[in-house]
Image (cartoon, rainbow, N blue to C red):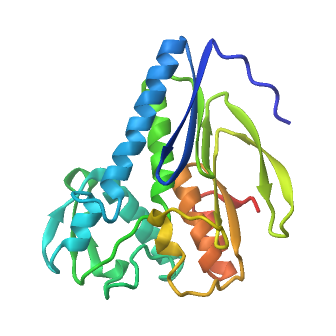
Amino acid sequence: MLHPAPVPTAAAQRLRIGLGTYIAIDAWADTAAQAVAAIDSAFAAIAAVDACMHPERAGSTLARINAASPGRRLDIDAGTHQLLELSRRLHALTHGVFDPCLPARPGSLADLELSGAPDSAWVICRKALALDFGGLAKGYAVDQAVEALRERGCRAGMVNAGGDVRLFGERRETLFVRRADGRGRPLALADTALAVSDRDARERPREHRGYYVRGRRPAGGRRYAAVLAPTAVVADALTKCLLLCPEAAAQRALAAFGARSAA
């Protein structure tokens, strides 16, 4: 049973638009001014992820990768390297079903060579790619926002970006999550991340196109997925595994990351 969390010394909440959705951030800190400054830093971290990982924005890392000539070595940032490493791991766990490269170009994730260390990060595309992090970048942005709150001295908080939620510290929240049968149920969250994906959603950010227009019929028959995981990027990515993979592969991926389905 979850017990009521202690009342923070000071708290602040802010709501803004970003990543094609509404983003709500709240923070608990020693003073209100500290909490507000931390939230500003968290929104700046989200904006930095959007600028770096938008597949079409001029100068973004993904845009440079997609424009690179085959065989050319291209230096990349540590964040993009981290998401490519995660994608490669999921690619292996799902026998190639999880792939952030769109079919608009011939290359797939298997055609991308990645450096072994993030402190000297580079890629080489062996074929032309249409790399799109729409299936996991929002979760990564949520994680970066949480790290920004912590670095500013917040002892607790929550970041909610259009269904990708992460709580840390003493922050508690109960959300209603849809089950596979369409009914909702309350879900008590504490020091965890939750992500949801709905193939039938009426409105989807353009940045999320990569995992909805692949032409692949969901092998497990799922149209909706919700995942609890230690980090938002993992939860976000694993919802796509649940939507696209055979059940055995989806469960294998969940187990590998200590995650579970919440739907």
Q: Position of residue 161 (x, y in %)?
A: 56, 47
Q: Is residue 162 above or below residue 207?
A: above
Q: Position of residue 59 (x, y in %)?
A: 21, 57
- Kindly identify the residue that appears in the image at 50 percent across and 76 percent down: 98
- Residue 150 visible to an observer of this rendering: no
Q: Position of residue 175 (x, y in %)?
A: 76, 45
Residues 122 and 10: in front is: 10
Q: Is residue 132 above or below residue 108?
A: above
Q: Is residue 45 above or below residue 231?
A: above
- Kindly identify the residue that appears in the image at 72 percent across and 82 percent down: 221
The quadrant of the image that shows the N terminus is top right
Q: Along the horizontal axis of the image, is 148 left or right of 176?
A: left
Q: Along the horizontal axis of the image, is 130 left or right of 201?
A: left
Q: Along the horizontal axis of the image, is 54 left or right of 42?
A: left
Residue 131, by quadrant, is bottom left
Q: How many marks?
A: 0
Residues 234 and 217: in front is: 217
The quadrant of the image that shows the C terminus is bottom right
Residue 71, by quadrant, is bottom left
Q: Position of residue 204 (x, y in %)?
A: 56, 64
Residue 217, by quadrant, is bottom right
Q: Is residue 91 above or below residue 159?
A: below
Q: Along the horizontal axis of the image, is 147 left or right of 241?
A: left
